[in-house]
Amino acid sequence: MEHQGLPRFLFNRLTSHDEPTLTNPLSDAVKEVFGSLGPLARSSPHFKPRAGQTAMAIAVADTVAEGGSLVVEAGTGVGKTFAYLVPALLSGERVLLSTATKTLQDQLFARDIPDLLAALGLPLRLAMLKGRGSYVCQQRLAMAQQAPTLPDRTSLRTLAQMQTWANTTRTGDLAEMPTLDERSPLIPLITSNRDNCLGSTCSFWKECHVNAARKEAMSADVVVINHHLFFADLAMREGGMAELLPSVRVVVFDEAHQLNETGIQFLGQQLGLGQMLDLARDILACGLQLAKGLADWQGVVGEFEKSLRDLRLLIGKHPPNTRLRWLAGYPQGIHPQDWGDAMLLLTQRSQGVLASLEVVADAAPEFVRLHERVSDIIGLIAHFSQECPAGSVRWLEVGAQARCMEAPLDIADVMQSRLLQTVVTVPDSQGNAVDLPRSWIFTSATLGDDERLSWFTEPCGLSQATVLRVESPFDYASQAWLYVPRDMVSPKDAQHSAAVGEVALQIARALGGRTLVLTTTSRALRAIGLQLQAALGETGDLEVLVQGESPKRQLMQRFRQAIEAGRQGCVLVATASFWEGFDVPGDALQAVVIDKLPFPPPNDPVVEARGQRLEAQGRSSFNDYFLPEAAVSLKQGAGRLIRRESDRGALVVCDNRLVSTGYGRRLLANLPPMHRVQTLPELLQALAGLTKTDTNSC
Ligand code: SF4
């Protein structure tokens, strides 16, 4: 791809017969953009040149020019988005940009990139590509309206509204349908997946939104995707990327800290009861609509469904998101004979369904795809009946439904063998094909606790990558206090959550809310949530929000808006994704209380297998895995506190292992350099000053 009037820096550099110059022209252009008289300064009165941002942008420019891999940890406030966007957009190369969340994907597509293109005066074509599940499938929407069973009585009306919207939408992106609840049970019925898409035999093929989005991406200069789509496509060549990637020379992963965990979800195998029940529903709907009387659909599908229900009963009741180890050929807690019998019955019932589908294979294209899906299920049952491959881990995930899961321990092999060494073939000025190395940029605010960022680079196969750490420009010593209660009971003590709740209560009262309590377990979340609601909420003093009561976006919005119009702030008790995805700049958040050092759960099958692999290599699983994991999570949790230069507040870690043990001091050294306070009265006094709008520093 060559943009009219734009330099193609790499191409010029690699094909030039002139003496090599010391500086890369792309870096020079980037320095100018970030200079005090550059286009960013001219387009925004708020822009200020920042040394860290410029250093990162130059490092990205060098990697774009030379090819290879660059890993950048850029602390909060560096301005990393523009630091990678400016060199990537100026390069004249085709760029693929991947984020962990759809929120950042939407923000880059709708705001950051258009703003930057306008400031730089670049006429580039931009496209966004999401996974299939984000677009309405016209074929499935039509089928759903004829379906014999629907989730509830209002479904038909909602489907009619969806049809009205589907008739007018250009993109088919469900995010554009304002009335649609993202948790609606109708969404799986009106979107496609790899299993149920009819492909080129579909009667809606020409107007299909999934196809249209892929075509648009193919002709764009910059394509914004997400990590899920990237790996789904890598695993199944199904997301449209297989056609896109060969012509892309610059790939940027933002929020790269999630890359490994996202990747392993797609690079293994899964067999879900929910997936099989969906299949049963699709077979019944198609059979009754398109081949009624040609097979006993109700009988054969009913038997298949019964074997699924029996299997679910055999697995038994467990708390949500339980992961059962699967070490000796069957999941923990299930008798091997019972498991084997259930799998055999499931295979036989699946074969019964397959036989019925064979009879009607010519009746409609839908049956060909259904036949493939049932065959895939039979193959997966056979796979899960054999031993787990070396380098992978297997477990049974149990929630409302259950899923047999298998995943590689990391993505290093795939990154090395299928991505990092690949080249892009482009024509030179004489029209001859030239192979150029691809440029891979990985960035996030937190990527490790050592100079090599081994926490990130090792599992991602990036040990040879160039690494850069750019410190946050914030003055933590004067913006933030750190308090570790010395007299706090041990985290193993049954009274620990109550003691954490007591500290959080005093802080919330001193601040008038404005407090985020981050817990390491769901049990602590419930206990502390109830304690704070009883002490603050019921008296009407302060609103106490607890994760799970509303969707995350709504909780964040309520928390942000709480101090508007002179109202009190509020308290939020949360766990898991809130450690890294909670972004509330300003006075609405002035304290973050963390209950315990966030070590990964040692009895989780994936965590356990990773630890065992390190020990088998003669390494320490504690030093090389558990500790770096805790360091990264702790820094992410602490990172919720200071989001901009004017923010001020306190981080309270209710686990005195942080200051009383050698490993705790390693974790402490990885946190930003905050001002330490030794006692709760000292902290409360400091916090009391915060609620006034003074400008004194800590
Ligand atoms: S081609 Fe697939 S995604 Fe597109 S409308 Fe048809 S079934 Fe749906």
Image (cartoon, rainbow, N blue to C red):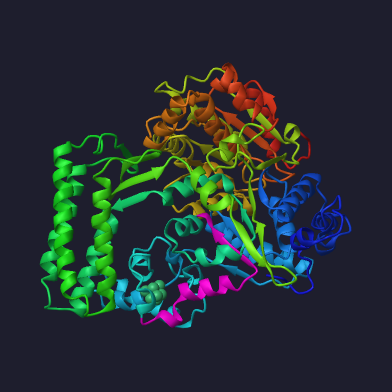
Quadrant assignment for ligand 1: bottom left
- Point out the image quarter for the C terminus: top right
Using the image, determine if residue 294 lies above or below residue 399.
below
Q: Which residues are magenta?
A: 203-227
Q: Position of residue 121 (x, y in %)?
A: 78, 70
Is 225 magenta? The answer is yes
Using the image, determine if residue 30 lies above or below residue 339.
below
Tell me which corner region of the image, top left, top right, bottom left or bottom right, holds residue 605.
top left
Side of 208 relative to 114 (left or right): left
Side of 20 relative to 548 (left or right): right
**Number of dots carrying numbers:** 0
Tell me what residue is drawn at x 69 percent, y 53 percent.
Answer: 67
Tell me which corner region of the image, top left, top right, bottom left or bottom right, holds residue 353.
bottom left
Tell me what residue is drawn at x 74 percent, y 43 percent.
Answer: 693
Residue 261 visible: yes
Tell me what residue is drawn at x 68 percent, y 62 percent.
Answer: 112
